[in-house]
Image (spheres, helix red, strand yellow):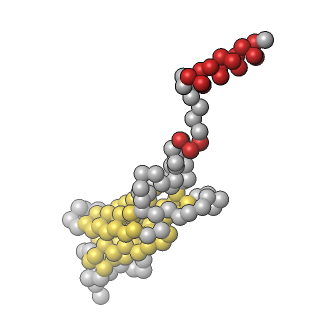
Amino acid sequence: MKKTTAGLFAAALIGTGLGAVQSAADAAPYPSSVRTDCSAHATGKPRAGKAVMIETGVQKVNDNVSGSPRGPITVTVEKLNGADSGSGSGFKPGDTLISLGKLKPGNYTGSMDFAPANGNSKFEPCSATVTFRVRPAR
């Protein structure tokens, strides 16, 4: 008797629109649930007078998820004593090379940041640190 009364009450609520059932299609398309892993390092041995190239990578952690992370990658570096800096950006999935231009000799540190291409991406943003030394020109 209790089950019948509860069922009739629920049916009446749904029929009048007071008890709505949300379908899966109405849910948020991507809840940013796929973790990404970022990496960055200077290529070769950076020398003064030549453009410094930073190799960056963004990979999804779970291989069972379809698609590839896409979005802007930004690299910003600064000389440890603050006298010089450089930045560059790219937009490509997987590994990409980003040029920071010509930097003066010294030790540099900075960050690489990845943001998904749009607000509904299933991939999460990530970041990595990059440190390298620019040697004097030969």
Q: How many marks?
A: 0
Q: Residue at x 52, y 49 (%)?
A: 30
Task: Give left or right: position of 37 versus 63.
Answer: left
Give the camera-side residue of 110 and 88.
88
| Quarter of the image where one finds residue 51 | bottom left
Is residue 42 among the parts visible in the rendering? no
**Residue at the limit of the structure toward the right, as seen here:** 1
Q: Residue at x 56, y 63 (%)?
A: 67
Q: Is residue 116 above or below residue 99?
A: above
The x and y percentages for residue 130 are 40, 64
Is residue 92 among the parts visible in the rendering? yes
Give the camera-side residue of 124 and 103.
124
Q: Which quarter of the rendered picture does the C terminus lie within?
A: bottom left
The x and y percentages for residue 59 are 53, 63
The x and y percentages for residue 11 are 65, 22
| Quarter of the image where one finds residue 7 | top right
Q: Is residue 41 above or below residue 2?
A: below
Q: Residue at x 23, y 67 (%)?
A: 84
The x and y percentages for residue 3 are 76, 16
